[in-house]
Image (tube, rainbow, N blue to C red):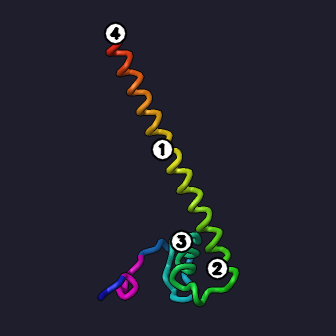
Amino acid sequence: MVTDHMIEREYRVPTDEDETCPYCGRPFRSKRYMTFHVGIDHAEKCSDVELEAFNEERDDEEYELFTFHFKAAISVFLAYFLFTFIYALVWSG
């Protein structure tokens, strides 16, 4: 069985971006992506500081995702309410 970790990939990262994994040398566009990579793929090797940075980034992402879902749910609710209100106005004549 072949997994993503077994496939060698070539990564193209702009030359002005130099965030690379200290364990495997994989390049990343941002420090955040590298932090996630280290925390997930190298959790057994990373230091306490790196693990803490990973946990903070994960918490931030969970909050951002919750905020996005909340805004999306409110938008759907408001659109439904608006269309229902317009429908009632049109048919009440």
| Inter-mark Cα distance, 2 to 1 | 33 Å
Residue in the foreground of this view, choosing between 51 and 33: 51
Q: In which quarter of the image is the N terminus?
A: bottom left
* Contact between labelled residues 1 and 4, with CB atoms less than 8 Å apart: no
| Inter-mark Cα distance, 2 to 3 | 14 Å
| Inter-mark Cα distance, 2 to 4 | 63 Å
Which residue range is magenta in the image? 4-11
The quadrant in which residue 11 appears is bottom left
The quadrant in which residue 57 appears is bottom right
Q: Are there few (<14), some (14-19), or many (20+) residues within 10 Å of tag 4? A: few
Magenta: main secondary structure? loop
Q: Are there few (<14), some (14-19), or many (20+) residues within 10 Å of tag 3? A: some
Q: Earlier in the sequence, mark 2 or mark 1?
A: 2
Question: With respect to residue 63, does 24 lie above or below?
Answer: below
Q: Mark 1 points at which residue?
A: 73
Q: Of the numbered discs in the image, which one, if any, rests on residue 51?
A: 2
Q: Does dot 2 land on a helix, a strand or a loop?
A: helix
Task: Give the amino acid type for the residue marked by disc 1 in the picture.
Answer: Ala
Find the residue positioned furthest to the top: 93
Task: Give the amino acid type for the residue marked by disc 2 in the picture.
Answer: Leu
Q: Name the residue under label 4.
A: 93
Q: Does dot 3 land on a helix, a strand or a loop?
A: helix
Task: Give the amino acid type for the residue marked by disc 4 in the picture.
Answer: Gly
Residue in the picture at 44% in, 29% down: 81
Q: Are there few (<14), some (14-19), or many (20+) residues within 10 Å of tag 1? A: few
Task: Give the amino acid type for the residue marked by disc 3 in the picture.
Answer: Tyr
Q: Mark 3 points at which residue?
A: 33
